[in-house]
Image: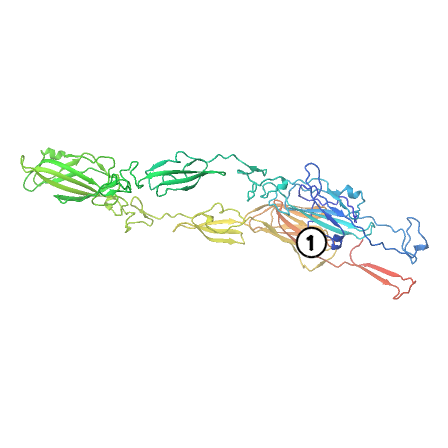
Amino acid sequence: MIVEPNTDRIVPRRRALLLAGVGLGSLGLVACGGGNKAAEQESSSSSSASETPQDSGSASPSVSGEASNTPDPSFSKGYSGGEKAPEGKYVMADYRGPAQNVRVPARPDESYKVNSVEQQDYNKSPDFPKFKWTAAITGQNYEVKPGQSIKFLEARTQYPVIDVPQKRDPKNLLVKYTVTYSKSPEKTAPRTSHVECKYYEITRCGDGIVDTDRGEICDPNDPSKTGWGNGGCDASCKPINTVVEQPKCNSDYNGKTIYNEKHPVAALNSDMALCSKGKVTSFVGPDQNGNYSWTCNNASSNVSCSAKEMRCGDGAKNGSEQCDPKDGNKAGWGNGGCDASCKPINTIIPKADCDATFYGKLRHGRGYVFDDQITGTPTKSRYLKDFKVDHREQLDFNGADPFPSFEWTQEIKNQNMILNPNQTIKILTATSPYYVREKPIKRDKNNLYLEYTIWYSDSQNGAWSAEKECKYYEITRCGDGILDPEYGETCDPNDPSKTGWGKGGCDENCKPKDIPQIPGQCNSQYNGQTVENLTGGNHLCTTGTYGNFNYDQATQKWTWTCNGEAGSTPVQCSAVKPSRPNIEKDLIGDKNHKYKVGELVGFRMPFGNTGSQTINNVKIRDILPLNLEYVSSAIQGVPSYTNGVYLSGGVQVLEYSGFSLSSGQQGVLLMTGRVLNTNPDNRTNRVGIYENNYLWDYDTEPYQPAPRALHIEKTVDKPQVFSGEIVEFTIKVSNTEGTFT
């Protein structure tokens, strides 16, 4: 195999990998492949990339050759002109023999090409490394020996990977090697092309994959957390291990017995500092016996902790309790038992021997001064001698205060203790107020009982008589289930008839309560955000329930509502997909038209932004095929831009850049080219649209060539010949279009 040499036929372009041997891909490339199968079977090559921290390294294809058993064609009849010609003298062929000393055409200089395609500008440079023939192949005069493997191309400079890929991909970078070769040293031997494609995946610490071959022990974005330490994985892909203190129970609670005055509210909960070291987990309690248990743990170990509470209702009189309703000994109980607050219950039985009985009301939370008022008889005076006041309470309503004592009023003292006929006068008064601090277990007319006994005589020194008055009080409060308008109640929260209630019931102050119209609230994690995908659910709302979930393909926008409590107005929420630029390419005119050499070809390339967000730093690159020469271009729908045409390795590139596309903005790029006489098979035109140098969309469009105008015809002078006869062949070549060299 003979490799055709080439000097500096490198196609410079942007971006690649620290490979020291990759280059620009064919800009119109859709897929990579060899020239023809025969060539691929006859010769093979391989491409690679090597990392070099200091030197240039190489990414070089190599080839292996094979011997040919096909003999060269020759004539054995004799010498043209009748004799062997001197060295260097040309003698044309005749009936005596073939032509002698035929001039060999010069070796063409196009024999290899290295191209690259990158997803983004990794080396932050407009240039890609250039390639050269290796000393190994030039030392063999570009010949690959049968069965030999040899490196024949190498890059001249390194390729630094500076930019981070948006996504790790096996196709982050493509390098395409094309080499032309022949099987014979003859200059006129047929040439074959062989194409190899090498894809490179760009790795880094933090891409979510552990690359042990790159020295990574872990990756901070690896969802499986492989190789992580107890503190995670650092930015160098090394595990983070921290010293963890052993968990420890808080001695203020662990093993303690605590009296709970606020029962049924629990004395302990998981939010308390129940652990001196570590985190509180597995909290349980209290059980029916008042037991608590929890665990203090960290990432490596745990310790068990416990406590116990005493409380009203645990079956024993303890703490500040006067009694316990579950105490089997009934210590401290009243004649009616012991209430849920561990206070004695005393039942008051109405007296049957009262001379007068009265009923009244007291209000919880207020104070009262008790007194006794009496009315004299119609006909005679009474002389008051003495008095006695008794009381009975169902509960100790006034708390720690003693029950008030009584004394004669100043009014009766001023009358020398004489009650005049038909006179009504206050004769007794309490020396201190009585404050109703405790709530009764049940509102009852017998909540409190007062008994007044008055001794008197009908004359100054007459015999004494007694008169007994009985007074019963029921203690009222907001929440006792009875509406008491005289105490300012509009309703009662425990009134079964719900008299005077608002839409939301009745509050603790016995006032009607309206339903608060709590509106729904969008979750800011999604509302107003740009997301790749979104599913419906209540996670889309911080408060309220979601509804009316919808996705509009045209605007690439999700919408939903967050519905609050009844009567509130639903809140509108939305999220959008990231905006991406798009572009298409079409021929102007009849797609079935056959284009001749010199004819103009027009392309129309509509582009735009169908998303809901503005796209900045937009660039359009139109890669012309080798069969087309740039003539003109124009862009519509973009107010300001930068444009130009440049060569990239012999390929013409039309570029428009420096503009933005707002939501819904559309534009059109028009380009005209002229059909050339060269490279008639390279006719696919490719255009791509970029955001921040990242290719988001592209399209290709070929055109059809006119049939070639070159014609060849071969004739013979005799229809039949015999052995030894001379036959004359005539070869006629004609051209009706273009110029052929």
- Look at the picture and state if 515 lies above or below 241: below
Under circle 1, the secondary element is: strand
- Look at the picture and state if 730 lies above or below 133: below
- How far across and down, in percent of the image, does residue 379 sit? 5, 41
- Nearer-the-camera pick, 253 or 468: 253
- Colour logic: rainbow
- Nearer-the-camera pick, 650 or 422: 422
Q: Amino acid at mark 1?
A: Thr
- How far across and down, in percent of the image, does residue 340 sit? 29, 42
The reply to whether residue 678 is visible in this rendering is no
Instruction: Answer with left or right where residue 326 lies relative to residue 614.
Output: left
- Extreme bottom residue here? 719
Residue 733 picture quarter? bottom right
Label 1: how many Cα within 10 Å (few below 14, some 14–19, many 20+) = many
Q: Which residue was labeled with disc 1?
A: 684
Instruction: Answer with left or right where residue 22 lies relative to residue 323.
Output: right
The reply to whether residue 374 is visible in this rendering is yes
- Look at the picture and state if 71 lies above or below 479: below
- Nearer-the-camera pick, 645 or 191: 191
Instruction: Answer with left or right where residue 722 lies relative to residue 640.
Output: right
- Extreme front residue here? 329
- How far across and down, in percent of the image, does residue 573 sit? 47, 49
- How far across and down, in percent of the image, does residue 60 sit? 72, 44
Instruction: Answer with left or right where residue 725 lies relative to residue 422.
Output: right
Please count the marks in the image. Answer: 1
- Nearer-the-camera pick, 507 or 696: 507
